[in-house]
Amino acid sequence: MKEINIPISDFRSAPPDGEGSLQVQLDPNLKIGKAKVFAIYGKGGIGKSTTSSNLSVAFSKLGKRVIQIGCDPKHDSTFTLTKKLMPTVIDVLEKVDFHSEELRIEDFVYEGYNGVMCVEAGGPPAGTGCGGYVVGQTVKLLKEHHLLDDTDVVIFDVLGDVVCGGFAAPLQHADRALIVTANDFDSIFAMNRIIQAIGAKAKNYNVRLGGVIANRSKDTDQIDKFNEQVGLKTMAHFPDLDVIRRSRLKKSTLFEMEYSPELEKVQMEYMRLAAALWAGADPLPSIPMKDRDIFDLLGFD
């Protein structure tokens, strides 16, 4: 495997985000600009990519110009939008020996369903680099090619529940962080850790918690218990429907699937969520729970 040499100059010392934390600092020149920026987090396998892609389409159907950035080495965030796996930013940079000036827009940006622009940041090979570098290089390329100038919405779809400095990097760019969760202990436990990470980033950046998206869940009673304790609220609820599973298998967004009454309800929930986020989700000053307290809180009476 070819060694990837990441320039040390691309990293900067940062003020601590919290006790014992030292993160990669955001270059002030890489601020995204006027677009509304959302970072989607949640436990691995909870449906963040499905949520992100359908939310991107919902924004596009509101007439907004949208860029979705997948931040996962397996680079499958946008495949329902583009119908195939796209090359990652880190892949195309490696091909030109990290001389970004040699890249063209079409080398790393692909138009998906209903005009959503799709980028897969990818990630360095395991154990060889930092996810924060990859996110930073992706934003840098988008700015160099002026792709953010006329963009209304940027959605970062972020790897699993990893909250290290690298994969917390999208929080440096985001206005609001949204957490996707199911109505179960593991998902909510991961959500609590993500709240801690967002709180740490909020010390030095503008990101704030926007709310919770309940996914793959018939009920929300456990989510509701947790939200009440920490000061969160559920912004949207998507049940565990077979049509959602089939949409991934068909490499399609939910807005392209054959009509059914239950599908229409899900589509309308995405449209409602997009409209609410565009109008401005109030920041939620949530306070994470201690691990032991979550164990004591959750469970069926």
Image (cartoon, rainbow, N blue to C red):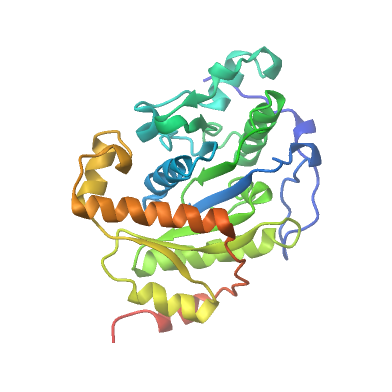
Q: Tell me the quarter of the picture where residue 256 sits.
A: top left
Q: Position of residue 157 (x, y in %)?
A: 50, 44
Q: Is residue 61 left or right of residue 173?
A: left
Q: Position of residue 203 (x, y in %)?
A: 74, 62
In this view, the residue in front, 213 or 135, is 213
Q: Is residue 222 above or below residue 138?
A: below
Q: Position of residue 130 (x, y in %)?
A: 62, 39
The C terminus, quarter of image: bottom left
Q: How many marks?
A: 0
Q: Is residue 171 left or right of residue 233?
A: right
Name which residue lies at 51% across and 68% down. 192
Q: Is residue 218 left or right of residue 49?
A: left
- Asked if residue 218 can be seen in this view, the reply is yes
Name which residue lies at 40% across and 35% down. 76
Name which residue lies at 69% across and 40% down. 32
Q: Tell me the quarter of the picture where residue 12 sits.
A: top right
Q: Position of residue 118 (x, y in %)?
A: 49, 31
In this view, the residue in front, 40 or 257, is 257
Q: Is residue 102 above or below residue 227?
A: above
Q: Is residue 131 above or below residue 264?
A: above
In this view, the residue in front, 220 or 88, is 220
Q: Is residue 270 above or below residue 129?
A: below
Which residue is farthest bottom?
Answer: 301
Name which residue lies at 48% across and 35% down. 73
- Asked if residue 42 can be seen in this view, the reply is no
